[in-house]
């Protein structure tokens, strides 16, 4: 009986009966590559979109994280993934060298005297082959062989090129063209000699990457260089941040002054002995006489500070010399949650808005709750710059805010006036129907009736903004208070940006006119290139023109 190797004999003894059976194992013992593969379940379009949204949400959380280390590590991880991807792309663009190319290039032996005369001869000749950003590819070697038909030497000019790339280009071109390197000079020129026994090859363009792929390779190299520099920068930032955290654990001595816009000065102090307590002193601008100040602070400022920073901020009385307010911050009482802690620190950094915007917040809060206030139809002056104020006129259904706009420079006055007029016109757009009503006038509006004469001198006009209850509902209150408190700084910022932009445009225009004048000079090199050997043009008559044609 014949049995294949894939069959087996089984003996089964039951009830004094012996049974023989042949089992074919070829069906069960299939090779691993023949085993049925489980097909991956295809994702629907909606599932793919949801997955992509999830990844984007996680990335947004990391990039907007209040912890700087999380943000830096996310950027570093993303940059390293890009670096790996670029290296793979460059590896795919590199062609494997043929055995003929891998053989070491053995140029002809030339004496020093021969090299000297070949160098002098090559420098006098003007034939050259350009190597651009694509680098070395088949077309460059082809052009070298075409030049070697009539010339013994050829220059290879590399622009743009780095000093380390020039040596690499020289070796690659010598290997591919079988030429001899005579000289490398000026950090961008290579002089090649074809050799004494030069024979033009049948295939003058070696099998290298194409022109399109060479350009693609250059783009990947540039991106890889910038990505590597960005990775080094991020690693340095991460190291500095970790060193900063280590110093904070030990404690650091800090005594720092700085000035914010609208003449608000700050002074922060931290001692090594007590690193969890920070002293923050604030100096406010000098108030004009019409504003209401109590104890050197705007009306309601202390209550606003207690509400905003309750639990970890103590107001010192009296404040430090030269300051209107001194706060003692207990950092050990901050919550452990990073996002909540970051929000509190931002609130501490916005102490200017809390203090100077306290009267404004009280009035707008009363408007939002529709409570009748004692100062209805009474003009209220609030300080926002040194010896300058803006005015509020509270009413039952609205609050009118008037800003007298003053600037010192005459150019700033013109730009601010133009900006404010366009600002008012932008309010008329269809998408801004629910925005506060905005008006500009060169003369004081009727709402400022009864204001001091000094407050009515505004060289850039008056801007009037009308706030309704819908503009201060819920979370809109904080945004409205901040926007109104910093409105003059907002206008000043755009005025300075416009002035800087115009200065840049004028400088570019002057440079272009100077270049045009230089090119128009009779003895300049550009005029020689444009008009030959300094030739001038003369208007010809019709007869002279016909005679020249003959």
Image (spheres, rainbow, N blue to C red):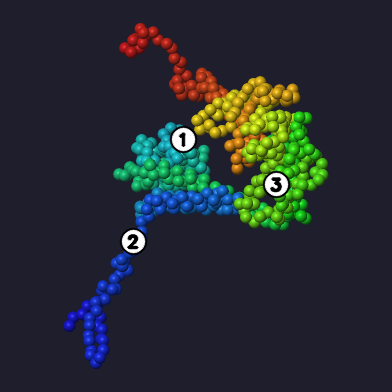
The percent coordinates of residue 381 (x first, y second) are: 72, 31
In terms of depth relative to the viewer, which is nearer, 249 or 343? 343
Q: Is residue 142 visible?
A: yes
**Would you say the residues marked 1 and 2 are in contact, meaning their CB atoms lie under 8 Å apart?**
no
Which residue is located at x 71 percent, y 33 percent?
375
Q: Residues within 10 Å of mark 3 (few under 14, many from 20)?
A: few
Q: Disc 1 versus disc 3: distance between alpha carbons? A: 82 Å
Which residue is located at x 76 percent, y 34 percent?
292
Determine the secondary structure under disc 1: helix
- Furthest residue in direction left, as rendered: 1
Mark 2, mark 3: which one is toward the viewer?
Answer: 3
Determine the secondary structure under disc 3: helix
Left or right of residue 79: residue 402 = right
Mark 1, mark 2: which one is toward the viewer?
Answer: 2
Residue at the spot of label 2: 39
Which residue is located at x 33 percent, y 10 percent?
546
The percent coordinates of residue 311 (x first, y second) are: 71, 52
**Would you say the residues marked 1 and 3 are in contact, meaning their CB atoms lie under 8 Å apart?**
no
In terms of depth relative to the viewer, which is nearer, 179 or 440? 440
Per the rendering, the mark at residue 307 is 3
First in sequence: mark 2 vs mark 3 = 2
* Quadrant in the picture for the C terminus: top left
First in sequence: mark 1 vs mark 3 = 1
The percent coordinates of residue 393 (x first, y second) are: 68, 30
In terms of image quadrants, where is residue 358? top right
Residue at the spot of label 1: 123
- Furthest residue in direction bottom, as rendered: 16
Q: Is residue 410 visible?
A: no
Which residue is located at x 63 percent, y 27 percent?
464
First in sequence: mark 1 vs mark 2 = 2
Determine the secondary structure under disc 2: loop
The percent coordinates of residue 205 (x first, y second) are: 34, 43
């Amino acid at each position: 009986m014949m049995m294949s190797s894939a069959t087996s004999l089984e003996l089964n003894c039951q009830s004094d009966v012996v049974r023989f059976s042949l089992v074919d194992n070829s069906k069960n013992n299939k090779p691993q590559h023949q085993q049925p593969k489980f097909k991956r379940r295809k994702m629907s379009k909606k599932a793919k979109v949801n997955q992509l949204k999830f990844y984007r949400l996680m990335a947004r959380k990391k990039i907007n994280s209040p912890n700087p280390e999380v943000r830096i590590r996310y950027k570093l991880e993303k940059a390293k993934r890009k670096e790996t991807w670029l290296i793979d792309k460059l590896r795919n663009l590199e062609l494997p060298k043929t055995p003929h190319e891998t053989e070491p290039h053995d140029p002809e032996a030339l004496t020093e005297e021969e090299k000297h005369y070949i160098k002098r001869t090559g420098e006098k000749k003007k034939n050259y082959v350009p190597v651009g950003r694509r680098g070395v590819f088949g077309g460059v070697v082809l052009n070298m062989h075409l030049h070697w038909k009539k010339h013994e030497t050829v220059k290879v000019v590399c622009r743009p090129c780095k000093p380390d790339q020039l040596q690499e280009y020289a070796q690659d071109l010598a290997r591919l063209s079988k030429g001899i390197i005579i000289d490398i000079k000026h950090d961008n020129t290579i002089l090649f000699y074809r050799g004494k026994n030069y024979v033009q090859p049948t295939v003058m363009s070696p099998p290298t990457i194409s022109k399109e792929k060479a350009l693609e390779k250059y783009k990947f190299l540039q991106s890889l260089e910038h990505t590597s520099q960005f990775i080094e920068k991020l690693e340095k930032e991460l190291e500095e941040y970790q060193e900063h955290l280590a110093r904070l654990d030990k404690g650091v001595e800090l005594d720092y002054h700085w000035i914010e816009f609208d003449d608000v000065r700050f002074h922060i102090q931290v001692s090594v002995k007590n690193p969890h307590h920070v002293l923050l002193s604030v100096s406010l601008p000098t108030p004009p006489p019409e504003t209401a100040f109590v104890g050197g602070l705007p009306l309601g400022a202390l209550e606003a500070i207690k509400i905003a920073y309750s639990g970890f901020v103590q107001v010192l009385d009296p404040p430090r010399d030269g300051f209107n307010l001194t706060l003692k911050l207990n950092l050990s009482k901050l919550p452990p949650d990073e996002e909540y802690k970051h929000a509190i620190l931002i609130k501490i950094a916005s102490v200017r808005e809390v203090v100077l915007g306290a009267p404004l917040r009280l009035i707008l809060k009363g408007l939002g709750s529709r409570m009748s206030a004692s100062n209805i139809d009474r003009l209220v002056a609030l300080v926002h710059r040194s010896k300058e104020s803006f005015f509020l006129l509270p009413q039952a259904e609205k609050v009118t805010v008037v800003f007298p706009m003053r600037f010192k420079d005459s150019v700033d006055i013109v730009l601010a006036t133009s900006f404010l007029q366009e600002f008012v016109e932008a309010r008329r757009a269809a998408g801004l129907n629910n925005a506060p009503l905005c008006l500009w006038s060169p003369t004081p509006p009727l709402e400022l009736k009864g204001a001091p004469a000094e407050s009515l001198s505004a060289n850039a006009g008056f801007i009037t903004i009308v706030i309704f209850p819908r503009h201060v509902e819920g979370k809109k209150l904080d945004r409205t208070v901040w926007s109104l408190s910093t409105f003059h700084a907002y206008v000043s910022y755009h005025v300075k940006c416009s002035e800087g932009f115009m200065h840049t445009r004028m400088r570019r225009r002057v440079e272009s006119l100077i270049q045009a004048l230089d090119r128009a000079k009779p003895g300049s090199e550009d005029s020689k290139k444009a008009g030959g050997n300094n030739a001038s043009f003369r208007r010809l008559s019709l007869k002279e023109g016909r005679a020249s044609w003959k």
